[in-house]
Amino acid sequence: MAASLPGGGAEEAGENGRKSPRTPKHWALKERLAELVRGLPPGRSLPGERVLAVEHGVSRSTLRRALAELTAEGRLTRVQGIGTFAGEGKLTQRLRLSSYTEDMRGHGRHPTAALLDASIGAADPELALRLGIRSGDDVLRLRRLRRADGEPMAIETARLPLGRFPGLAHHVGDGSLYRVLWERYGVALDHAEETIETALAAPAEAALLGTDVGALLLLLSRHCFDTEGRPVEWVRSVYRGDRYKFVATLVAPRTEN
Amino acid sequence: MAASLPGGGAEEAGENGRKSPRTPKHWALKERLAELVRGLPPGRSLPGERVLAVEHGVSRSTLRRALAELTAEGRLTRVQGIGTFAGEGKLTQRLRLSSYTEDMRGHGRHPTAALLDASIGAADPELALRLGIRSGDDVLRLRRLRRADGEPMAIETARLPLGRFPGLAHHVGDGSLYRVLWERYGVALDHAEETIETALAAPAEAALLGTDVGALLLLLSRHCFDTEGRPVEWVRSVYRGDRYKFVATLVAPRTEN
DNA sequence: TAGTGGTCTAGACCACCCC
DNA sequence: GGGTGGTCTAGACCACTAC
């Protein structure tokens, strides 16, 4: 199978005569490969880059750009030294307090959380504001790597005001932090403000998540409050954009027209 | 100012002797440029690519990769034929039913919505399932381009079952669709399920949004239901990932321990 | 050693905008 | 014409994995 792609030049007249947007070669190639991948079962391996480039009549760089886009979309998985494989599709996680474990179980996946780091530091002014403490106060920083069936999925960095939770560092493990807050300190979470945006993987994150540097991430920032309205923690989580999507239920305001 | 970057080769011993992740040149360069951009007011222009590449002792390709990452993060804005400029930061939109207009006004922005297309087609099996109709039934497809202060921000494609809303195509304009549904058909939205994931800009989307092909997007899919639990519309929206973030309020379940 | 993917380079050429 | 950013190429070299 060969057949080379049309050049990047303008062509094809859209409806009405409105000029259609230019389609770069890498995008046309991406769509062609997407069609190919669609017919493969997840995990099935593809030919090497050099072979694919020749087969489709493009340079390796152009081929790599198309593959990078498919990888970002979760349609391919690539491992250095091993090969390129058909992707597994995205997992859906509900946007709510304390949901990772249940959602993964709901998908028939085995979730684990490894504590990467638990350290104490001083709050900078911004963090102090968020946690309702004074700049310089002690803050406990917990860093976890979440996996599903052993596959790295997300990095979660939580920060809590240590003044409210003395000795907390000795009580955290791989289990539920919220359970510890309730059982040892009598603090229950009430609500949180969570923002979602895109981000790119820094080298350290890429290493932990097993992605390339610059890979697409979903960045979730969660600001949690207890039943008295006091801030309890500030969590920054990055999820693999190629493996995750989030779902929320929206309710119409009562005073709707 | 010059000083070239360290090569991509392994080096530097991290703390403890744990091997630190390799930092590619483009990432180191990105961080260096990010520092530079941080000191600039939004809209301030940067030197051209060729100049920057020489200044930092890298090839134009590597420089471009660093600039692409900064652009994806919203820290730079680039326009072909014009130049590269410091970015404006991200806007925050609340995740709720019917919020774009109010949220933009809340930011002091002037929101507009242009109707790109209103057409009638037959539902494919998947869409029919979502809209609670039979495959092949008429579906109204509405496509809007949303802007803030004239800047393209999102493309919204809504699909509604025409059987429930006869003549709807003649009553839609640039105003609120939900208002029309209520005033002419007595249908009020009750709730929706909204999923959020990442996506890349196809050529047509890139042209409308003024981004490059392959630019980072946030893809929101909204499935709306009326007060009787019947599906009312299916909306697929793509927002510029470099300009947007979303925020939701999460509430703890009552039975939380 | 030989395969895989990942990085970086130098240079050609194109599309777009403004003068 | 001469500036900007965008695409594509050919090739060198690196890092990782398997045998």
Image (cartoon, coloured by chain):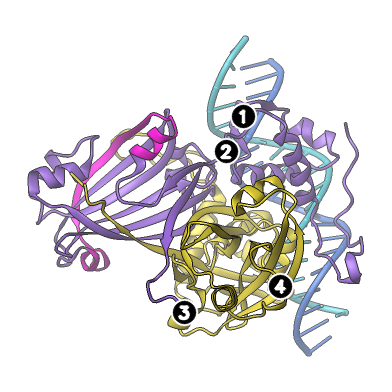
Chain colours: A yellow, B purple, C cyan, D blue
SS at circle 2: loop
Label 4 vs label 1: CA separation? 44 Å
Are discs 3 and 2 less than 8 Å apart at CB? no
Are discs 4 and 1 less than 8 Å apart at CB? no
Asked whether the viewer can see residue A48, the reply is no
Label 1 vs label 3: CA separation? 43 Å
Q: Position of residue B203 (x, y in %)?
A: 46, 45
Residue nearest the observer in this picture, B241 or A18: B241
Which residue carries the number 4 mark? A167
The residue type indicated by label 2 comes to: Gly
Range of residues picked out in magenta: B102-130
Which residue carries the number 2 mark? B89
Q: Position of residue B256 (x, y in %)?
A: 43, 75
Q: Chain of mark 4?
A: A
Left or right: B85, with B239 as reference point: right
The residue type indicated by label 4 comes to: Gly
To the question of a shared chain for discs 4 and 1, the answer is no
Which residue corresponds to the image point at 71% horizontal and 57% vertical from the top-left? A202
Q: Mark 2 against mark 4, which lies toward the viewer?
A: 4
To the question of a shared chain for discs 2 and 4, the answer is no
Left or right: B192, with A35 as reference point: left
Are discs 2 and 1 less than 8 Å apart at CB? yes
To the question of a shared chain for discs 2 and 1, the answer is yes
First in sequence, mark 4 or 3: give its number. 3
Are discs 1 and 3 less than 8 Å apart at CB? no
Which residue carries the number 1 mark? B42
Label 3 vs label 2: CA separation? 35 Å
Asked whether the viewer can see residue A11, the reply is yes
Is B136 in the magenta? no
Which residue carries the number 3 mark? A102
SS at circle 1: loop
